[in-house]
Every structure is written in structure tokens, then in C-alpha cells.
């Protein structure tokens, strides 16, 4: 055997210990286990009726009958297969014996021709030959005995396999490998037979569910099927079982007639006729009940139409409430814009701004002078002068702002034509007087710059929305709660009217329509109220 | 089952293999000349057919029968047979090489709990050819022994 770092070399005789010779025996054991499992499954199939549970205990009795049928016919084939496998094992034994004798002779010849004494090898080879003969006799004998004593139980099949597998190796030794492999193929007949038998029983069970009788009984079968269906729906199989017993009909007889036909089928048919008549009456009863059900259906239909009307009105109500949310946001935005426009031109603000600018410039100048002196205690106030704004400066600043205001609207229109989004324009509008020069510059900006500006404004807009929401929740909790309270109260009152069934104590369809129209008409007033409350809560125009 | 008997059979096979090496040279060569084409080569062909996956072709081409009295097959060779440069021997046994590129996470327990760190490890791939070789040899064992015994009879008759 080669090792790592060298090629993989395998010599059959030298490396015989690497082949796991017990593996065929393990395979046989697995075959036996599989056979036992198959038998267990089949027994379960018979007991459970494989899907006949839906038809109740009567159907389970039928399943038992089917299992008996399977044992009487299909399992007979299994018994024959077992017999055939036994004969196959006879042939296997002959082949294995021939192989063993040839290998035995070959090893003897090799030993005799080598420089080593062949006595030791001869002794072990003789032992191998004895083991082979023993296997041949025992395996064939076991198969024959098992076939003769076959009772129909699937456990017997598993037993045959297990026992044969055991004998395949007991005392056989040297050629166990050869016999085991061939034996596995032979015993495979039995496993195949089990599987086939299982499938046949399944088919029979399915056939019972379909109630496929011979042509002479088609009519009766159809009626029985119809009655059974109705009874299954009604959950009254027990009554049918009682009726069948009173008619002297058992499932065993029925299944036997199903399988054999002929006179037996005629006899069952005669017994079935009164039963069919009786349950034909039951079918009529079902029809009568169906008439009542039809009336019930009509009543339900009317109720459904009324419910549909209420549902439509409720949908409109939901739409109106959703529209309320949207309108509220728009109203808040409009209010913010109005505030910004009102403060656009601010003469006093212009004057104050000019004074502030002049003061700041004087402060910077004085600070520079104070720093330039040698006395470290000097302060800028020691060197500052009072500042003043001339009338001409004031008029000039005010004029620039008025011109900017006049150009502001046209500049915004220009930006809109260049594709600046509505949200960005709104942001520019909210900037007020300070934003007018920026708007004027933007009209001369490149397309790339405008695109970048729009992207930045979108991000800012999202932040503003978050800030508004946070302000409504945390900045003025009392007023925010009042807003929510108004909406909740509206929802509760309207829902209370709509959820009441139509035509009972609740509103009529017409009244619902009026409610819906009222919601829409009153929407604008609600929007204004909510906007005012929100603005009051924040203390400033909100975006 | 007869585990003890199987072990005895294995011992006898090994004794026979040693006896084959002690045969006279002409007899041993005559036996090898028959065993290789009639037993070892068909067996190598059956093994080659069982390989699957992306390395099936180079492995099959690297499966050969030796001219020996004991039926022998060899799978391997040091010549590169795949695009990455691996030899058939490396495909059979797998390989470990390098020490840089592959990074693995290693977790070590400490008093405070555990700590996970990364370390560079060797590249590896696992050889899979042996999973196909031995089951094939085992399932053909009976045929091999039968053929081998027939060849011995023929060769000894010719001597």
C-alpha cells in the first residue's frame, strides 16, 4: 500500500486487509433491516387503511379486508419469490464452491512453487473449502425451509434475509467476500417482492375509495358513492354503518364482491338496493335542506350588499382622513411661506443691520489699535469711537433690498424654468431678504451647480420634516396632544356612526354619503385649525 | 458474522502474495504477463470509470495497471495534470501548501470569555479519489480472485 508522498498502489492479494471484507455482510444486514421496515410500513398501511380514515371505522374494516386479500394473493407471490431466491442460493453455492476450489488450488500451486513450504497454506485452504461446503448446504436449506414455513407475515421475510446472511458467513471465511456480494443480489428478490406487494395493496386501497365495480354495478356504485359523499359531508358515517349492518351487508362481503364479481357481486347488489333506496330518501332530505339553505343564502346576500355599502363609505372616510394628513402638511408649509414673505422688506431691519455692520467694523479697528500699543492693559473700548449711519447709506441699502425684492419673483420663475424642483424653490423663498441675492446669483449658475444645489436641498428638506415632527411632539406637548385629540375624536365619532350596521340603528347609505361629503367640506376648516395650533405650538412658521 | 474467518483469509492472501515474490523469475514473469491484461487492466478501467467531478478525467488517465503477478493498479504520478499545476498524486491524497493568503478566524477561550482573532493558514484541498477506488475493488474482488485462479491454472499447465 502506498503512503502519502507516493502514488496510490493497490495489490489485491497484498492489500486484502484494506478492502473491508465485512462490508458485504453489513450490506446484507442493511437489506434485512430495510425488509423489516417495509413489512412494518405495510402492516401500518393495512391498519390505517392508507387514507381510508376519512371514511371512518367502516373503511378501516375494509382496509383490514384488503390486507387479508393482499396476504392471500400478493404475498403468495412473495412466497414464490422466496422459493426462487432459495434456488438461486443453490446456484450461488455451486458458483462460490467452484471459485473457492479454484482459488484454493491456485494458492496451493503458488505455495508449492515458491521457496517456502506449502504445508501451512494447505492447512488453511482446506479449512476454507470446508467452510464453503457448509455455507452451500446451510444457505440453500435455510431458504427452502423459510419458504415452506412462510406464514404471510413480512417479519418472516426479514427473518429469511437475516438468517441467510448469517449463514453466508458462518464458517465460510475465506470467500465470504465473493459469496456475500452474490448473495446480496439473490436476496434482493425478496426485498423487491415486498415493495411490489406494498404497492399492490396501496392500489387496492385506492380502488376501494373510487368504488370501481364491474359494469353491472355501475349504477349502484354511483348511487352509493353519492350517498357516501353526502354522508361524509354530514359527518354521519356511523348511521350508514348501522344501516349497512341492518341490511346484512359487511365490508368483507363487499370487498370480496369487488374482487371476484359474478354471483357474489349480484348477491351484494341485491342487498345494497334497499340501502340505496333508503339513502336516496336521505339525499332528497338534503335537497330539501338545500332549499332552506338557498333562502339563507339570499338573506346573506342582502346583508352582504348592505355591508358593501358601509365598507365603501368607510373607505371614503379613510381616504378623507388620509387627505387630512396631506392637507395639514400643505397648510403648515403655506403658513411658513406667508410669514417669510411678510418679513421680506424690513426698513427697520435694514437700518439696524447697517448700524450693526458699522459697529462691528469700528470694534475691529479699535481692537487692532489697542493690540498695537505697548500697554498690555489697553482695551479696544479705549480707542473706539461712536458709530453712525448716514441717510445716504441707509437709502442706498434700502434701495438695493427693494430692487432685490422686485427681481426676486422673476428670478424664482427663471429657476423654475431651469428645472429647479418645487421643494428647492420653497427653501429659497423661506430664506427671505437674505436669500434674494443668492437667488439672483443662482439664475447665473451652471446646470451642474443647480443640480448639486437641488440634491443638497432635498437632504435639508428631509431634516426639516424631522425637526417639525420633533417640535410638534416635544416642543409643545400640550398643543400637540390637542391636535391629536381633535383627530382622534373625529375618528371615533365618525367610526361610531359608520360601524353600526346599515339600516338597523345606524346610518342609512344616504346618511353615510352625507357624512363623507361633510368630511370633505369641513376638511379645509380643520386644516386651518390644525395649522394654527401647530404654529402656535412652535412659536414660529413651520416648514 | 465471521470476522475471524475474514481475518484468516486476509492473512492467507498476504502469505500468497509473499509466495508470489518467491516464485522462480520465469514463472513469475509469465504469470504477470497474463495477470496484467486480463485482471489488472480491466480492474483499472473499472476504477477509472468511477471517478466523478472536475478531476475525473486526469484521475482516470492516471489510473494504470502494473505488470505484476499480484493484480496491482496504481493511481498517481508527479506530473502536473490540471491547470493549477497539481499532480495526480496530489489529487488522490489532497495537498497542503503555501502559508499566506488564506485567512481563518480562530476563537480562543480566556478567563474573561473568549477572544476571536485572525491568522493566516495554509491553502488546502482534500483528496477524494480513494472514496471511489476501494469500493470498486471490493465489489470486484470475487471476479478478480476467480480470474486470478484461472490464470494460475493455465500458466502452471504451460510450464
Image (spheres, rainbow, N blue to C red):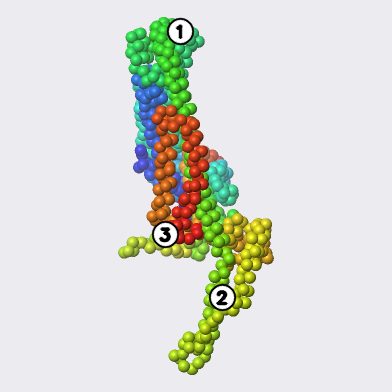
Which residue is under mark 3?
A475
Expressed as whole percent of the image width and height from the top left, the position of residue A379 reads 46, 87
Q: Residues within 10 Å of mark 2 (few under 14, many from 20)?
A: some
Which mark's residue is nearer the viewer, 1 or 3? 3
The image quadrant that residue A539 belongs to is bottom left
Expressed as whole percent of the image width and height from the top left, the position of residue B101 reads 51, 63
Quarter of the image that includes the C terminus of chain B: top right
What residue appears at the point 61 percent right and 71 percent down from the top-left corner?
Answer: A398
Front-most of A177 and A220? A220
Q: Chain of mark 1?
A: A
Horizontal side of A413 relative to A160 (left or right) equals: right
Badge 3 marks a residue whose secondary structure is helix
Badge 2 marks a residue whose secondary structure is helix
Which residue is under mark 2?
A354
Q: CA distance from mark 1 to mark 3?
A: 95 Å
Q: Residues within 10 Å of mark 3 (few under 14, many from 20)?
A: some
What residue appears at the point 48 percent right and 60 percent down from the top-left corner?
Answer: A540
Indicate which disc residue A262 carries.
1
**Camera sees residue A32:** no
What residue appears at the point 33 percent right and 13 percent down from the top-left corner?
Answer: A242
Q: CA distance from mark 1 to mark 2?
A: 122 Å
Height in image: B66 above or below A355?
above
Q: Chain of mark 3?
A: A
Please report whichever mark, 3 or 2, sits nearer to the chain's N-terminal start: 2
Amino acid at each position: 500500500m502506498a503512503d502519502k508522498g507516493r502514488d496510490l498502489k493497490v495489490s489485491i492479494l497484498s492489500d486484502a486487509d484494506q478492502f473491508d471484507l465485512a462490508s458485504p455482510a453489513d450490506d446484507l444486514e442493511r437489506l434485512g433491516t430495510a425488509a423489516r421496515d417495509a413489512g412494518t410500513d405495510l402492516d401500518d398501511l393495512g391498519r390505517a387503511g392508507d387514507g381510508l380514515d376519512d371514511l371512518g371505522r367502516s373503511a378501516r374494516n375494509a382496509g383490514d379486508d384488503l390486507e387479508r386479500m393482499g396476504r392471500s394473493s400478493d404475498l403468495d407471490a412473495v412466497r414464490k419469490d422466496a422459493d426462487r431466491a432459495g434456488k438461486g442460493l443453490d446456484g450461488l453455492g455451486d458458483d462460490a464452491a467452484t471459485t473457492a476450489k479454484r482459488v484454493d488450488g491456485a494458492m496451493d500451486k503458488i505455495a508449492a512453487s515458491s521457496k517456502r513450504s506449502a504445508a501451512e497454506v494447505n492447512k488453511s485452504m482446506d479449512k476454507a473449502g470446508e467452510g464453503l461446503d457448509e455455507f452451500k448446504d446451510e444457505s440453500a436449506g435455510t431458504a427452502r425451509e423459510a419458504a415452506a414455513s412462510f406464514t404471510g407475515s413480512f417479519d418472516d421475510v426479514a427473518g429469511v434475509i437475516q438468517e441467510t446472511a448469517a449463514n453466508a458467513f458462518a464458517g465460510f471465511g475465506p470467500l465470504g467476500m465473493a459469496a456475500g456480494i452474490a448473495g446480496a443480489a439473490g436476496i434482493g428478490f425478496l426485498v423487491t417482492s415486498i415493495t411490489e406487494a406494498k404497492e399492490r395493496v396501496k392500489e387496492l386501497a385506492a380502488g376501494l375509495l373510487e368504488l370501481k365495480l364491474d359494469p353491472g354495478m355501475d349504477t349502484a356504485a354511483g348511487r352509493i358513492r353519492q350517498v357516501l359523499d353526502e354522508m361524509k359531508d354530514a359527518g354521519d358515517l356511523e348511521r350508514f354503518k348501522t344501516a349497512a349492518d341492518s341490511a346484512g351487508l359487511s365490508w368483507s362481503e363487499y370487498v370480496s364482491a369487488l374482487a371476484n364479481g359474478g354471483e357474489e357481486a349480484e348477491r351484494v347488489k341485491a342487498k345494497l338496493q334497499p340501502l340505496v333506496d333508503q339513502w336516496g330518501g336521505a339525499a332528497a332530505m338534503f335537497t330539501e335542506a338545500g332549499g332552506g339553505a338557498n333562502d339563507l343564502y339570499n338573506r346573506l346576500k342582502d346583508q352582504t350588499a348592505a355591508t358593501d355599502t358601509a365598507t365603501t363609505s368607510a373607505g371614503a372616510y379613510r381616504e378623507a382622513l388620509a387627505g387630512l394628513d396631506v392637507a395639514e402638511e400643505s397648510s403648515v408649509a403655506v403658513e411658513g411661506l406667508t410669514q417669510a414673505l411678510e418679513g421680506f422688506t424690513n426698513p427697520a431691519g435694514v437700518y439696524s443691520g447697517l448700524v450693526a455692520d458699522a459697529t462691528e467694523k469700528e470694534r475691529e479697528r479699535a481692537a487692532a489699535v489697542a493690540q498695537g500699543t505697548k500697554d498690555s492693559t489697553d482695551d479696544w473700548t479705549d480707542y473706539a469711537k461712536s458709530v453712525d449711519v448716514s441717510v445716504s447709506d441707509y437709502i442706498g441699502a434700502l434701495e438695493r433690498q427693494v430692487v432685490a425684492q422686485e427681481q426676486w419673483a422673476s428670478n424664482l420663475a427663471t429657476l423654475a424654468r431651469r428645472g429647479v424642483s418645487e421643494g428647492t424653490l420653497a427653501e429659497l423663498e423661506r430664506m427671505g431678504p437674505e436669500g434674494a441675492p443668492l437667488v439672483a446669483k443662482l439664475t447665473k449658475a451652471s446646470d451642474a451647480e443647480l443640480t448639486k444645489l437641488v440634491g443638497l436641498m432635498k437632504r435639508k428638506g428631509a431634516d426639516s420634516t424631522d425637526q417639525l415632527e420633533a417640535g410638534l411632539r416635544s416642543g409643545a406637548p400640550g398643543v400637540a396632544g390637542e391636535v391629536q385629540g381633535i383627530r382622534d375624536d373625529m375618528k371615533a365619532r365618525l367610526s361610531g356612526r359608520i360601524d353600526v350596521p346599515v339600516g338597523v340603528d345606524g346610518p342609512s347609505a344616504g346618511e353615510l354619503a352625507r357624512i363623507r361629503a361633510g368630511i370633505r367640506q369641513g376638511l379645509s376648516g380643520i386644516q386651518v385649525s390644525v395649522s394654527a395650533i401647530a404654529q402656535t405650538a412652535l412659536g414660529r412658521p413651520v416648514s | 458474522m465471521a470476522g475471524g474467518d475474514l481475518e484468516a483469509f486476509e492473512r492467507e492472501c498476504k502469505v500468497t502474495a509473499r509466495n508470489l515474490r518467491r516464485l522462480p523469475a520465469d514463472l513469475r514473469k509469465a504469470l504477470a504477463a497474463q495477470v496484467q491484461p486480463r485482471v489488472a487492466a480491466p480492474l483499472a478501467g473499472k476504477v477509472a470509470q468511477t471517478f466523478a467531478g472536475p478531476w475525473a478525467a486526469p484521475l482516470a488517465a492516471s489510473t494504470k495497471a502494473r505488470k505484476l503477478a499480484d493484480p496491482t493498479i496504481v493511481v498517481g504520478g508527479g506530473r502536473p495534470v490540471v491547470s493549477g499545476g497539481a499532480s495526480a498524486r496530489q489529487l488522490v491524497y489532497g495537498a497542503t501548501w503555501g502559508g499566506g493568503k488564506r485567512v481563518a478566524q480562530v476563537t480562543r477561550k480566556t478567563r474573561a470569555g473568549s477572544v476571536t482573532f485572525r491568522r493566516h493558514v495554509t491553502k488546502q484541498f482534500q483528496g477524494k479519489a480513494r472514496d471511489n477506488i476501494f469500493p470498486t475493488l471490493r465489489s470486484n474482488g470475487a471476479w478478480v480472485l476467480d480470474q486470478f485462479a484461472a490464470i494460475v491454472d493455465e500458466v502452471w499447465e504451460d510450464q
